[in-house]
Image: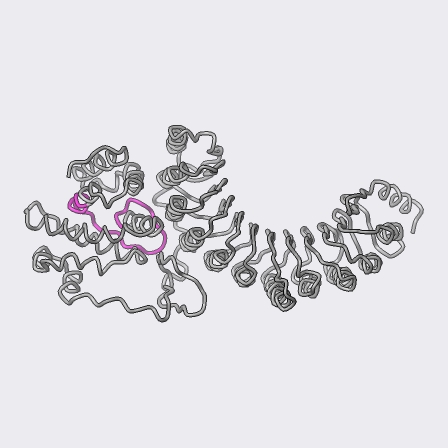
Amino acid sequence: MASDDIAQLADALSKTHVGDGELSYKGLGLKLDNAESVEDLVCEIEQYHGLRALRLEGNTVGVDAARAIAKALKSKDQLQRCYWSDMFTGRLRSEIPTALRSLGSALMSAGARLTELDLSDNAFGPDGVKGIEQLLKSPSCHTLRELRLNNCGMGIGGGKILAEALIECHRQSIAHGAPLKLRVFIAGRNRLENEGASALAKAFQVIGSLEEVHMPQNGINYAGVMALASAMRHNPELRLLNLNDNTFTKRGTLAMAQALRHLRNVQVINFGDCLVRSEGAIALAAVLREGLPILKELNLSFGEITEAAALVVAQAVTDKPHMEKVDLNGNCLGEEGCEALREAMENMDKGDMLASLSDDEGEPDDEGQEDEDDHENDDDASDDCNEDNEDDGGLVKENGITRKDDSPAKPQSPAEIMSFLSCPSAEKLLQLGEMRTNLQQTVDASDPHKAADVLLKIASLYSEEPETKGAVFEAIDAVLKKLLSGSALQSYCFLSTLLVMMGILKGEGKVKKVSLVPGQLLCLEHAVQQEYFPQHHASLLHAFMSKNSDALESCSSASENLSSTLEKKCHGQRLSH
């Protein structure tokens, strides 16, 4: 070793932090190539009795140097925390797995019981995961509480290897009578994509003890997001979920919303830059209405959310006593929309809660091209809002909709009702007589598209002729009572689908818009005045109709009446029936 290299190492070691069971060489920039280069470092490790934490981050360790350090670690049975991020700068990727195996073998030989392992910012790829595979499966990791693998380039293959290792670790830990209770998992910027994320979701579901999950920037779209959502439901202590800069779209966001309904301890949600869009934002607003009791931070920035949807989210967060920050920056509000959102938050005395809106993208271009993923696998797409969707045993998929295999079949609707729905007419509706209320049996909030279609068909028959008018209102009331009596998530999904079909909200995928007639709006006006129609549902409709009145130009008089009734309902004024 050159004399100036020895002098540099001696100077660096003089800055070493020792104390509280921790030996730190953090950020010293040491270039440790061989056994000779780490002699002093090894000596310090060997002489440190009761070593519990070793910091090697910010240095660069070669294969031979790693072997020498490993030899010193073989006697350190009390070691619990290994901070080994950014430890292989300038090394060949082929070297890293060998170095990691040496260090891992030493920990296993020592009988160490790790609680924290940080290997972030080591670009080791799938082969690097193989280098820690045996360590992760061993008793040394049965006690692991925090695993940090941020920015390691694991890829799909590495994600799968990691998932299998964690599942095996959990299996063996149970056999030893002390199940793995991993709390923090960090693996951002790893190009995991759908396959890697789905593999890890299986591990998360098995482990069930996660409190923090950070997986930003992994190229995950709705399929992987849905798998992760299902897994999160099995981790009831989850406090923080960061999936920033992945691609949810509507299907992924709905799945996440369904999962979040069951999680009572979540404090921070980061779905920024996830293409949540307006329909997804509405679903998340519904969850805010009925769940997430201790939420503190919500990030829905850069998600192509429009002004009306942002206002619905704002209204939903106001009743959250612990809420500290709502980030809706970088969406499609427009200048007036930003001002309306700020005003709404200030009127609710929550102005300080709203993050900056300085990067707003402006109002959306209605003629703009939809993303390719909007129509990806449309044949398998579903607007399913079934809150019991899981990939557990006993569930099967039919046409993209998950249901329980042994669930009872829905009762068959009478032929008269089926005949009416296939070709609706006022005459057929009147002929149904008392059977009109049975129309509610044909709708289910878990299938919002069909439910909205049935509602609009009935409402299209509106007439000022008293008998027809009464029959239409009776049928509308029966259908809407059922659709709005369930959870906020299901009713919000239904209302957003209704708005899409009416051309008031831009939706994803292939949704056939109806040609509106005044009677449909007059039926909604009637419904809004009923007790079964909650005020916050009226607020949702009002937010969109007041911002998208152009879509209702063909029914201007009925539209004005509906808007006036909605505004009164939103402000709690008594409505005349």
Q: In percent of the image, x 74 and y 51: which residue is there?
A: 87
Q: Position of residue 231 (x, y in %)?
A: 50, 59
The dominant secondary structure in magenta is loop
Q: In percent of the image, x 52 and y 56: which residue is there?
A: 235
Instruction: Name the foreground residue: 495 vs 572.
Output: 572
Q: Is residue 242 left or right of residue 143?
A: left
Instruction: Name the foreground residue: 482 vs 133.
Output: 482
Q: In percent of the image, x 5 and y 47: which residue is there?
A: 465
Q: Position of residue 240 (x, y in %)?
A: 54, 47
The verdict on residue 505 being magenta is yes
In the image, the segment drawn in magenta is 501-523
Quarter of the C terminus within the rendering: top left
**Toward which corner of the image does residue 334 lie, by quadrant?**
top left
The verdict on residue 356 being magenta is no
Q: Position of residue 543 (x, y in %)?
A: 31, 38
Residue farthest along the right direction in this orientation? 3
Q: Is residue 126 left or right of residue 291?
A: right
Q: Position of residue 382 (x, y in %)?
A: 36, 60
